[in-house]
Image: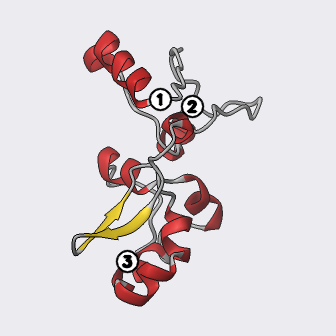
Amino acid sequence: MIPAAFDYHAPDTLAGAFALLEQYGDDAKILSGGQSLLRCSSSDSGRRPPGGCRRIPGLEYIKEEEGYLRIGACTREATLDRSELVRRKYPILTDATEVIADPIVRNLATVGGNLAHGDPANDHRP
């Protein structure tokens, strides 16, 4: 399957990302790790776009603040899986990340992207 052509923008600041969202409105889609988009847009050339919003500093983190676990939108599933904080205090998340697809997918897919995309056919194992 060859998808329709689309414009690709990779802002490196939140302000730049917000400006693009305002400019393109409902036609804009935010790319995080690109796992779903890459599945839809891969071609025979094997070329893939870089990781979209992952270029924006400060969107990949795992931390506790004021009694809450905070996970940045561009935090990769593999990062979540390796987090000592998550393993120690939130082991159910570790259990969940271990069944998400395979290591290659976990190194690309982001927590925010999986939540935002909400694809029931996503590459998760039962």
70 lies above or below 3: below
Query: Could you tell me the amino acid type at mark 2?
Result: Ser
Q: CA distance from mark 3 to mark 1?
A: 29 Å
Tell me the quadrant of the picture where the N terminus can be found: top right
Q: Quadrant of the C terminus?
A: bottom left
Q: Nearer the viewer, mark 3 or mark 1?
A: 1
Position of residue 73 measured from the top left corner of the image (x, y, whole percent): 39, 50
Quarter of the image where one finds residue 69? bottom left
Dot 3 falls on a residue whose secondary structure is helix
Of 3 and 100, nearer the camera is 100
Question: Is residue 98 something that shows in the picture?
Answer: yes
Residue type highlighted by circle 3 = Leu
Marks 3 and 2, the one that precedes in the sequence: 2
For the residues marked 1 and 2, what is the alpha-carbon distance in whole angstroms? 25 Å
Q: Which mark is residue 41?
A: 2
Q: Is residue 36 left or right of residue 116?
A: right
Q: In the image, residue 8 lies at what x, y percent?
A: 54, 20
Looking at the image, tell me whether mark 1 or mark 2 is earlier in sequence order: 1
Placement of 21 over or under 119, stated as above or below: above
Closer to the eye: label 1 or 2? 1
Q: Secondary structure at mark 1?
A: loop
Q: Is residue 69 rendered to the left or right of residue 10?
A: left
- Amino acid at dot 1: Thr
- The residue under label 1 is 13
In the rendered structure, which disc, 3 or 1, sits on the residue that comes first in sequence? 1
Residue 87's place in the image compared with 54, above or below, is: below
Q: CA distance from mark 3 to mark 2?
A: 30 Å
Residue at 53% from the left image edge and 14% from the top image edge:
5
The residue positioned 48% from the left and 43% from the top of the image is 36
Q: Kindly tell me whether residue 101 is visible in this rendering.
A: no
